[in-house]
Image (cartoon, rainbow, N blue to C red):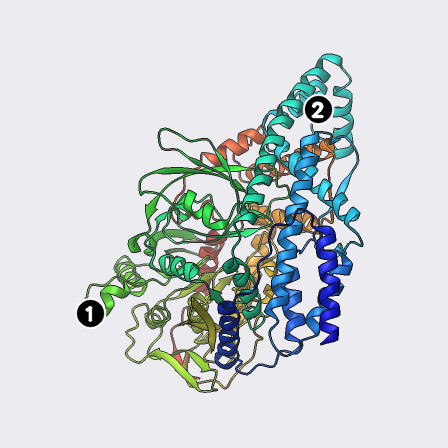
Amino acid sequence: MHKYIRATSIILIIFFSFTSEAKISIEVSKEKELLSKEIFLKISNEHFFRNQQLDNINLQLLQSLLKQLDPEKIYFTKNEVASFRRLYSSSPSEIDISSSYKLINLYFNRLTEATNYQLREVKKDKFNFFKDEEIIINNDLKEWQTNKLMLQKMWRKLAKNDVLTSMLANKDLDEVIKAVQKRYKNKLRRISQINDDIATYYTNPKDAAKVANLVNKDLDESIKTIQKRYKNRLRRISQRKEEDVFSIVMNNLTGLFDPHSSYFSPKSAEDFEMTMSLKLEGIGALLSTEDDYPIIVSIVPGGPAEKSGQINPDDKIVKITQLEPPQSPSVDVVGWRIDEVVQLIRGNAGTDVELELIPAKTEDLSERKWVTLTREEVKLEEQAAKSKIFEIQNSFNSFKIGVIDLPAFYMDFGAWQERDPSFRSSSKDVETILNEFNTQGVDGVIIDLRGNSGGSLYEANKLTSLFVPSGATLQVKQSTGYIRPWGDARANQIWQKPMAVMVDRYSASASEIFAGAIQDYQRGLIIGHRTFGKGTVQKLDDLSSGQLKITESKFYRITGSGMQNKGISPDIVLPATWDIEEIGESSLDAALPWDQISPTRFKKFQIDLEIIDKLKKGHLHRIITNPNLQYLLNIRERYDSQKNKDILSLNIYERKAERIERQKWALNTENKRRSALGLKIFETYEDLKEFNENKKEIDIDIENDFLLNEGTVILSDFIYLNQDFLISEAA
């Protein structure tokens, strides 16, 4: 008890000495204290790993909160972290929600203090953008600072970077670089030489004045933008209520069990239900926040975002503009509450909204893209499977390859429950397409599940039954240990010919069940990248207030191998332009481990493994000789060389030079591909950018979808080499 009081006293001293501007002081209500016990008891008893013993659960909770609240180590000091460790250690067995409230209060007040400090620094307008200065951007290299002065130095650098990034996003400064290139009449060289050119260019008095005007103009606009952004952050902090603090604590607590168990406040539960019902009129995207930026988490199949072809997971939203007359000014939403951002994006069907986005996996946050979307209610038919037939000529013959793009495992549950025989579903739509393919003499079919994050388990079973005679599709293991096989006992195999399934890292859940069953039955080829690896099932239970999503079971392949964490490994791996290990189940904290159970009985098709080896060799040969596949490898090489950057320069010369180098690389890489294919090359990066922006989005486009193109070639080779594919035998 004395240890607890002593630790608390230390924290209170630190708290009041560092937070003269503190305004947030939320205490635990009796209602939330009881609710926290209800949640902990329920998840402890009903989670898949029921009665799981979490050693030092409070210290684990502290570590989780620190990782969420201050991953960059810019708000808490080393002594504060140590004090909280002692405080959390004083009650190792019971959840210490009170200490978590103290930590979050300190965080919000420190964030307020840091933001006010940054506002003052920005207002001074004394940043030297020509000074050689840098910040560490690799969080693994950062350490807790020893005092407040060290924190303030970091806050100032971050504010400087915010202003600089905003300046670099302005297109006017690009004109300066163009003038440099024109004056010296040479191609871009090394970054150091580019800097020398820019520096020389500035020595001309007239040019220096021109540049100074451009910089001052951009600087004034950027300062206003950043000031407004910081004020929005302060407003967001001042609006925090106990429900916000409680949700942070509870979701970090449930996250200790696994990443898919979570607490929904009454408001969050309502939003979740609306999202699942797809009744919202908007752009069809799920949002979250990351480093103050609203971020695209996932895209609803068939929604405006997905149909635009320009929005991707991990894109960051910077500004939102309502385009309906009278057109309102653009609103910078960095630092906003996520519910406020959602309200800005939602609107009446038929109205337009423009998003200013930072592209996913970009090397520089100053890069931007602008996407205009027309809001609409996402309808089931918009998610429907699409198909197209291609004539593929390989080295031996010509084959008709049918491609079915399936964005989700959808089903009209309402119509199904009402026993409407004409209800819409993914399996029924695919069955119709397969019958058409049979009529048109298609030789082989590709089911494209890239980006398909899952959906109905019932539909995964039904889709499998279109390609495989009756039998199990997967096995489900309950928390009690009971194992049950799932499948379709009345399967009607529609497609008898060769097939392949294309997957990527975003293929998850039901997609993995289908792809795993096709692979285990040896019914077809799996082509692409390793899948997400989500092998768990959740249930949604009501609480005395809100709801709790709990992982209640795991599913396994019919071979007994788990899908959890490992996902489905393709038979033939295609090039990836980025490190797929950065996302997926295995990248999530507290992800449940891979394991295996006993196999269930099933019949599989006969497939010659030597043929798969020949297909791999053919694919590797094309990687060397095919300009499109070489282009993908070049992108990956570039990604690998840039992803481990530890520092970011705050020198405007260097940052602009880095952008020029990136643009030069992008232009040269694309022109190398086009030249090898006999296509017209682009003279400038602007020409390339304009071409890409004006490119029309085409459903199932094998001309520009290089991986799908390769998939059709692999399947056509498979058809030629494996004429006796459909001989079935007992496993």
The residue identified by callout 2 is 186
Q: Left or right: where does residue 110 sit relative to residue 627?
A: right
Name the residue at 34% across, 71% down. Answer: 458
Q: Compared with residue 25, is residue 310 higher up or lower down, i.e. above or below?
A: above
Indicate which disc, 2 or 1, sits on the residue closer to the N terminus: 2
Determine whether, in the image, residue 575 is placed left or right of residue 397.
Answer: right
In front of the other: 383 or 348: 348
The percent position of residue 559, horizontal first and vertical second, equals 48, 81
- x, y (%) of residue 543? 42, 71
Q: Is residue 481 above or below residue 677?
A: below
Secondary structure under badge 2? loop
Q: Position of residue 14 (x, y in %)?
A: 74, 57
Q: Quadrant of the C terminus?
A: bottom left
Q: Position of residue 713 (x, y in %)?
A: 47, 56
Q: Residue at x 46, y 82 (%)?
A: 477
Say if residue 244 shows up in the picture.
yes
Q: Nearer the viewer, mark 2 or mark 1?
A: 1
Q: Amino acid at mark 1?
A: Arg
Does residue 262 sit above or below 155 in this rendering? below
User: In the rendered image, is residue 661 in sight?
Assistant: no
Of the 4 image quadrants, the one containing the N terminus is bottom right
Q: Which residue is mark 1?
A: 419
Q: Which label is found at residue 217?
A: none
Mark 2: which amino acid?
Asn
Cα–Cα gap, marks 2 and 1 = 71 Å
CB under 8 Å between callouts 2 and 1?
no
Decide which of 658, 528 is in the foreground and name it.
658
* The one of 108 and 521 positioned closer to us in this rendering: 108
Residue at image position (19%, 66%) is 420
Q: How many marks?
A: 2
In the picture, residue 324 is in which quadrant? Answer: top left
